[in-house]
Image: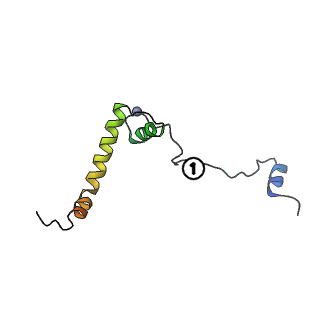
Amino acid sequence: MSTSYDEVMQSLGLEPSRPKRGRPAGSTNVGVQPCGTYPAYMRHKQAREDACEPCLEAKRQYYRAWYAKNRDRIRASRRVGGGRA
Ligand SMILES: [Zn+2]
């Protein structure tokens, strides 16, 4: 067996099969998020630069939303031994 699958495909006039890299919805797809979003804020941080005001605001809202979502769990974990209502 000396004929590879790709050679057969090429002899038929087709492109050799290549493993396609990169997923369409991957985290490597940075650079698309405009300022004023949390990913953009992270981009500032990764670039070791000060985040601009819209990005800082986006970060605040991101953490606020995260806290609101996990508030019950955070309170529950803090209430260990507390007992005051
Ligand atoms: Zn920014």
Residue 70 percent across, percent down from the top left: 28, 57
Q: Quadrant of ligand 1?
A: top left
Q: Quadrant of the N terminus?
A: bottom right
Outermost residue to the top: 52
Tell whether 77 sits left or right of 55: left
The residue beneath circle 1 is: 23
Q: What is the x, y in percent for residue 32?
A: 48, 37
Q: Amino acid at mark 1?
A: Arg
Which residue of the protein is positioned furthest toward the left in this rendering?
85
Would you place residue 57 above or below residue 7 in this image?
above
For the residue carrying disc 1, how many other residues have a C-alpha within 10 Å: few (<14), some (14-19), or many (20+)?
few
Closest to the observer: 81 or 85? 81
Residue 36 in percent (x, y) is at: 37, 35
Q: Quadrant of the C terminus?
A: bottom left
Residue at x-position 31% and y-position 47%: 63
32 left or right of 78 in image: right
Colouring of the image: rainbow
Q: Relative to 36, is 66 above or below?
A: below
Front one among 15 and 44: 44
- Residue drawn 33% across the image and 45% down it: 62
The mark tally for this picture is 1
Element class at badge 1 = loop
**Residue sitting at x 40%, y 38%:** 41
